[in-house]
C-alpha cells in the first residue's frame, strides 16, 4: 500500500520559499482548499480520541483518487519539496542543416546563424508524435532516477504540439507507459511550459497530493512546416525535383520562424522529499495577455467558425506569426527582470548559482541576458546551435545534457529562465 503525506494543516499549502504573503487564488484553488480543510478537520477529530502515544502517525482516509488503494498520513516534519531525481531526453534521428533548408526557401546558413545561432535541428519522420518523444524521454528519466513506472502518481506534460487537438499528450503518454489511472495534466504555455509545470508539480508535492511525478516537455514542430511532401523529399535529397517558384515563395514567406524550430522530448522525475536543502526553492512567473498577438497562430481556433477551413490554410493562418523585433526586445527585458527578482527575493546572487539554464529561443537573446546579469561563460549552457528552439523541451533538455556531461551535481543551485508566447516569462531556483 502506497502512502501519501498530507499537510497537517491546510494553511500555506501553495506558499513557496520566499513568497511571504502569497494569496491563494480563490477562483482556481477553492475546491482543493475546501477538500483539504475537510480532511484536516477529520485529522483533528481522529487525534482527539487518541492517547498521546498514538498521535503519530495518524491515519486519515484520503479522497485523492490517484490510486484506489491509498491512505494518507500526517507528515512528521516540515513541508515536502519536489526534487528532480532523474532526467532523460529523446532527439529524433534526422538532422536538418541550414543549407538543407536553403534548398526549399530563400535563406542561407549565414543568415540563420547570424540572426538566431541555429546551425542544425532534428525532425521526426511522419508518424512519430509528440507523445512518442515524451515516452522515450520519460523512460530514460525513470531509469536514471531508479524509479519504477508503477511508482508514478502524477503526469504533467508541457507541449504546444500535442498529437491531437484533444485529448492532451499526457493521457497518451500515460497509456503508452502503462502507468495505470494516475491523473495527467497538459500545460500549453509554449516556451515557458516547463517552468509552469514545475510550479504545478511543486504545489502538488507540497500539498501532499503527489509523491513521484513525471514532468515532460516535448514538441514536434516539423508539423508546422509549410512544405509539400515533394518539398520534404527535395529537402532530404530524396528527389531532384525542386519546389516550383510559387512553392519556393510560399516557403520563404515563413522563414523567419520555420528556420528556428526543432523536434525533441525531455523529461524529469520529481520526488517528494523532506530534505529542505534540495528541490524547487522559489519561482517568479508572469504573463501579459495584452501582447498575445506578437507571437501566435492566427487561425485554426474556435474564434473561427468552423475552427478550420481551406481558406485559413490557403492564407497560411495555421502557421505561427511573430513580430520578431518586439519579441526580442520584450524577451531580453523580461528575462533579466524575472531572474533578478527571484535572486533578490531569496537573497542570493549569480555568484551563488552554479548553473544558469535559459530557454533556447535565440542565441542573441541569451547572450544579451548573460551580459546584463553578469553570468560567467562557465555557468551557461547553450544548445540552440544543435537543436534549435524546442519550446517546452529546451530547459529539461539542457538539464539532462548538463547531468550527463557531469556539469550538474547534487547540491548545485540552478537558475532556470524562460520567455515565450502569451506573452509569458518565468524564473525558477532549484537545488539539484
Image (cartoon, grey):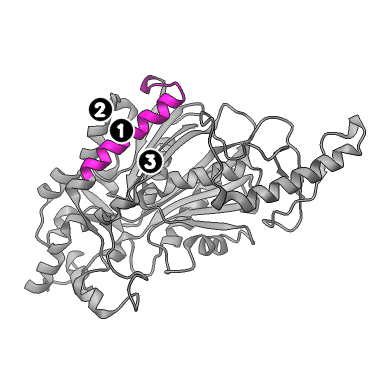
Furthest-left residue in this view: 245
Residue 294 badge? none
The picture quadrant where one finds residue 395 is: top left
Q: Position of residue 32 (x, y in %)?
A: 64, 50
Q: What element carries label 2?
A: helix
- Classified by dominant secondary structure, the portion drawn in magenta counts as helix
Q: Work out how far the residue at label 3 is from the one at label 2, CA to CA, in angstroms.
A: 21 Å
Q: Position of residue 15 (x, y in %)?
A: 57, 36
Asked whether, in this view, residue 368 is left or right of residue 217, the answer is left
* Numbered range of the magenta stretch: 328-351
Residue 398 badge? 3
Q: Is residue 3 visible?
A: no
First reached walking from the N terminus: tag 3 or tag 1: 1
Asked whether, in this view, residue 129 is left or right of residue 224, the answer is right
**CB atoms of marks 3 and 1 within 8 Å:** no
First reached walking from the N terminus: tag 3 or tag 2: 2
Picture residue at 31% right of the left edge, 37% below the top: 335
First reached walking from the N terminus: tag 1 or tag 2: 1
Crowding at mark 3 (Cα within 10 Å: few <14, some 14-19, many 20+)? many
**CB atoms of marks 1 and 2 within 8 Å:** yes
Picture residue at 26% right of the left edge, 61% below the top: 320
Q: Mark 2 points at which residue?
A: 372
Q: Looking at the image, is mark 3 or mark 2 nearer the viewer?
A: 2
Crowding at mark 2 (Cα within 10 Å: few <14, some 14-19, many 20+)? few
Amino acid at each position: 500500500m502506497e502512502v501519501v503525506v498530507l499537510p497537517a494543516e491546510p494553511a500555506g499549502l501553495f506558499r513557496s520559499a520566499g513568497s511571504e504573503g502569497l494569496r491563494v487564488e480563490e477562483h482556481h484553488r477553492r475546491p482543493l482548499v475546501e477538500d483539504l480543510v475537510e480532511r484536516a478537520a477529520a485529522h483533528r477529530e481522529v487525534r482527539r480520541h487518541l492517547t498521546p502515544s498514538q498521535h503519530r502517525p495518524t491515519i486519515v482516509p484520503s479522497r485523492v483518487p490517484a490510486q484506489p488503494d491509498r491512505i494518507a498520513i500526517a507528515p512528521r516534519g516540515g513541508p515536502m519539496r519536489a526534487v528532480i531525481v532523474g532526467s532523460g531526453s529523446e532527439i529524433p534521428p534526422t538532422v536538418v542543416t541550414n543549407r538543407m533548408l536553403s534548398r526549399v526557401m530563400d535563406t542561407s546558413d549565414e543568415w540563420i546563424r547570424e540572426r538566431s545561432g541555429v546551425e542544425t535541428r532534428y525532425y521526426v519522420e511522419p508518424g512519430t508524435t509528440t507523445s512518442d518523444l515524451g515516452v522515450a524521454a520519460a523512460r530514460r528519466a525513470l531509469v536514471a532516477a531508479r524509479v519504477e513506472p508503477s511508482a508514478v502518481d502524477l503526469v504533467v506534460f508541457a507541449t504546444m504540439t500535442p498529437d491531437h487537438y484533444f485529448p492532451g499528450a499526457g493521457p497518451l503518454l500515460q497509456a503508452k507507459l502503462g502507468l495505470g489511472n494516475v491523473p495527467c495534466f497538459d500545460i500549453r504555455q509554449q516556451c515557458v511550459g516547463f517552468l509552469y509545470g514545475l510550479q504545478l508539480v511543486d504545489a502538488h508535492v507540497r500539498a501532499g497530493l503527489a509523491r513521484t511525478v513525471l514532468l515532460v516537455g516535448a514538441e514536434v514542430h516539423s508539423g508546422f512546416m509549410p512544405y509539400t511532401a515533394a518539398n520534404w523529399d527535395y529537402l532530404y535529397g530524396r528527389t531532384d525535383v525542386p519546389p516550383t517558384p510559387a512553392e519556393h515563395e510560399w516557403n520563404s514567406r515563413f522563414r523567419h520562424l520555420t528556420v528556428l524550430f526543432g523536434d525533441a522530448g525531455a523529461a524529469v522525475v520529481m520526488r517528494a522529499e523532506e530534505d529542505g536543502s534540495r528541490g524547487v526553492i522559489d519561482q517568479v512567473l508572469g504573463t501579459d495577455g495584452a501582447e498575445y498577438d506578437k507571437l501566435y497562430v492566427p487561425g485554426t481556433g474556435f474564434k473561427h467558425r468552423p475552427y478550420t477551413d481551406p481558406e485559413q490554410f490557403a492564407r497560411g493562418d495555421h502557421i505561427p506569426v511573430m513580430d520578431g523585433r518586439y519579441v526580442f526586445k520584450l524577451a531580453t527585458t523580461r528575462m533579466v527582470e524575472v531572474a533578478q527578482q527571484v535572486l533578490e527575493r531569496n537573497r542570493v546572487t549569480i555568484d551563488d548559482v552554479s548553473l544558469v539554464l535559459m530557454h533556447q529561443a535565440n542565441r542573441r537573446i541569451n547572450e544579451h541576458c548573460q551580459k546584463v546579469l553578469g553570468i560567467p561563460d562557465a555557468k551557461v549552457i547553450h544548445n540552440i546551435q544543435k537543436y534549435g528552439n524546442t519550446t517546452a523541451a529546451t530547459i529539461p533538455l539542457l538539464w539532462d545534457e548538463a547531468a550527463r556531461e557531469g556539469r550538474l551535481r547534487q547540491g548545485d543551485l540552478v537558475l532556470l529562465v524562460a520567455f515565450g508566447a502569451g506573452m509569458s516569462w518565468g524564473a525558477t531556483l532549484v537545488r539539484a
